[in-house]
Image (cartoon, rainbow, N blue to C red):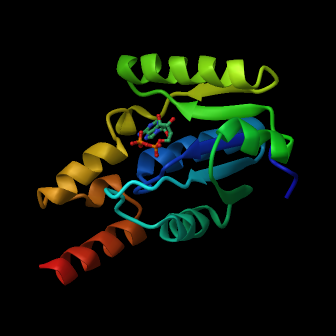
Amino acid sequence: MIEPRVLYPGSFDPLTLGHLDLIQRAVALFGSVEVAVAENSSKLALFSVEERLEFLRAETGAMPVKVEHFRGLVVEHARARGIAILLRGIRTVTDFEYEYQMAMTNRQLAPDVDTAFIMPSEDYAYLSSRLIKEVYAAGGELRRFLPERVHAALTARLRRTN
Ligand code: ADP
């Protein structure tokens, strides 16, 4: 695989069909993409970083996608990889405000790194990992939002905790 020129960072906790939609669009546009899982110490995480990497690798195995993790500043991780484009998804106007601030902050930190935005299919335009966590906590059905193996892992976990 050629070295990706684009970095798609996020927490991917959990990986959703919205994330995968974005990854497919990024591959179509840029030829390949590196997906980078942010290591954050949130106690509210559903899956460990290792589990998230496993899901991403399993779901993107057949595509020109590299899956890594990083700690600290995303722009530093991009620079270390020789990547000058960050990719983010925009779903709503609220996303835009947050993403705009983040892109501008990253530009201050690293003027040589730009952020590109992609809109998902309208099927996933409302889908967020945060809402998935809330629906999961309330015992709701998540099958239609998640890759099958992520859904199966969540179901197994629910069984263990009940
Ligand atoms: P969350 O999914 O809760 O927004 P992430 O940090 O995993 O959290 O998101 C990583 C990136 O993927 C962000 O740019 C986010 O806007 C984008 N993204 C997440 N879900 C979708 C979706 N359904 N459609 C488009 N972009 C998305």
* 8 left or right, relative to 96: right
Q: Is residue 100 above or below residue 119?
A: above
The residue positioned 49% from the left and 49% from the top of the image is: 11
* 52 left or right, relative to 2: left
The residue positioned 41% from the left and 28% from the top of the image is: 91
Relative image position of residue 7 (x, y in whole percent): 70, 42
Relative image position of residue 63 (x, y in whole percent): 69, 59
Can you say which quadrant of the picture contains the C terminus? bottom left
Seen from the viewer's position, the closer of residues 153 and 125 is 153
The residue positioned 65% from the left and 67% from the top of the image is: 61
Relative image position of residue 30 (x, y in whole percent): 76, 38
Q: Locate residue 78: give its quadrant.
A: top right
Relative image position of residue 156 (x, y in whole percent): 27, 79
* 88 left or right, relative to 135: right
The residue positioned 24% from the left and 58% from the top of the image is: 142
Q: Residue furthest bottom?
A: 160
Q: How many marks?
A: 0
Seen from the viewer's position, the closer of residues 127 and 47 is 47
Can you say which quadrant of the picture contains the N terminus? bottom right
Q: Locate residue 118: give its quadrant.
A: top right
Seen from the viewer's position, the closer of residues 44 and 55 is 44
Q: Locate residue 14: give its quadrant.
A: bottom left
